[in-house]
Amino acid sequence: MDVSRFYAYCLQGDVPAAYEYLRSIKNKSKKIQALELKYRYRFFTEKPIFHIKSKDSWIRKVLLAYYQYFIAVLTRQNTSEAEIQLVQSLAPCIPNNPSDMDLDQIEGQLELLFKNKGYHFLGGLTGPFRGPFIWKTMEKKVFKVELPYHTEEITVYFLSDFLLQSWIHFSTFWEKRAGGWAKPEGLYFVNDRPKKKKINLDGSEFQVSYLKHEAQHLSDYTRFPNLKPKDLEYRAKLVELIYEPKSFRLLKKFFYEGKNDPRFPHPYSSYVLMGKLSRLAFGHDKTEELEKWKTITPSLIQKWARNLYDEHTMQLEKIGAKGDGVI
């Protein structure tokens, strides 16, 4: 099984495609057979069984509402209808709630209610779907981060003891997760991982793919405050490539992740980025087979990434700070 291809479908929010890929595999190992059964029972049966890490009946009710929403949107059901159902499921969880509360208002109340139970709650979109992050423990560290043309001192909050890590975690049975996010006050890092997936803080995955990626977001929030997520992600991925000594690690990820759909900021930015690199490397926009990227030296990828970053910056400066993006 091509694991990267399988999880790429999940990260693109297309669980039916991931499931059909599993079904298409011939001579399945026991591990793949078990994975196929897990996806069938969670996403394609009427009454899936969930293991929720809390005995609190109110917490279980909130999480179940989000799980049902995840199943709906991840199996290509109408997103607007799924959000209406989510409102109807969550509203009874809010004491004395007005009948006209929308989802943003409900999540604002959930944040306060979870705080009273000792948890942090971050609602909103993990593009393009809803799905909060809910965690208990948070520790703070400070790092100096070099970015193109300047260095920033960044506060990083390390998060653990999660109840929920949004739809990405759910869609992959806890195998994949958002690495973290950026807010004006600093960076948030998801540190709640199995032992075999713990990240070395001195390694490239943390220093480049997380720290520089998210620090670039912080810089852009100030410099280009109206920038849309797809442009933010495009710039942050270019920064990763500028500093990554083994560029194929990232190219492989972007190759599988890419999707020509602006609703998905991460896959779409990867699609645009790989198209631009393909033009530089091979003379056309169509992304070549993955193996061909091994023939391109990391130093050349770093050079092209720096040029694309500078080009994008100049385009943004041309349209002004109020501009929302150019890709």
Image: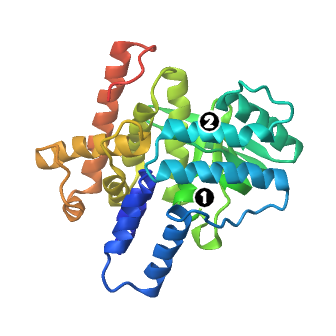
Q: Quarter holding the C terminus?
A: top left
Percent from the top left, x then y, of residue 131?
61, 45
For mark 2, give the secondary structure. Answer: loop
Q: Residue at x 48, y 37 (%)?
A: 147
- Residue highlighted by disc 1: 201
For mark 1, give the secondary structure. Answer: loop
276 versus 200 height, above or below: above
- Residue highlighted by disc 2: 124
Percent from the top left, x then y, of residue 220?
50, 28
How many numbered marks does the figure carry?
2
Instruction: Kindly indicate the quadrant of the structure image that contains residue 33.
Output: bottom left
Amino acid type, residue under disc 1 in the picture: Leu
Q: Quarter holding the N terminus?
A: bottom left
Q: Is residue 254 left or right of residue 95?
A: left
Q: Residue at x 84, y 62 (%)?
A: 55
Mark 1 crowdedness (10 Å alpha carbons): few <14, some 14-19, many ≥20: few
Residue 234 visible in image: yes
Percent from the top left, x then y, of residue 123?
66, 38
Residue 172 visible in image: no
Amino acid type, residue under disc 2 in the picture: Gly
Q: Is residue 272 left or right of residue 91?
A: left
138 versus 146 height, above or below: below
Which residue is nearer to you in this view: 166 or 298?
166
Q: Are marks 1 and 2 in contact (CB under 8 Å)?
A: no
Which residue is nearer to you in this view: 59 or 137?
59
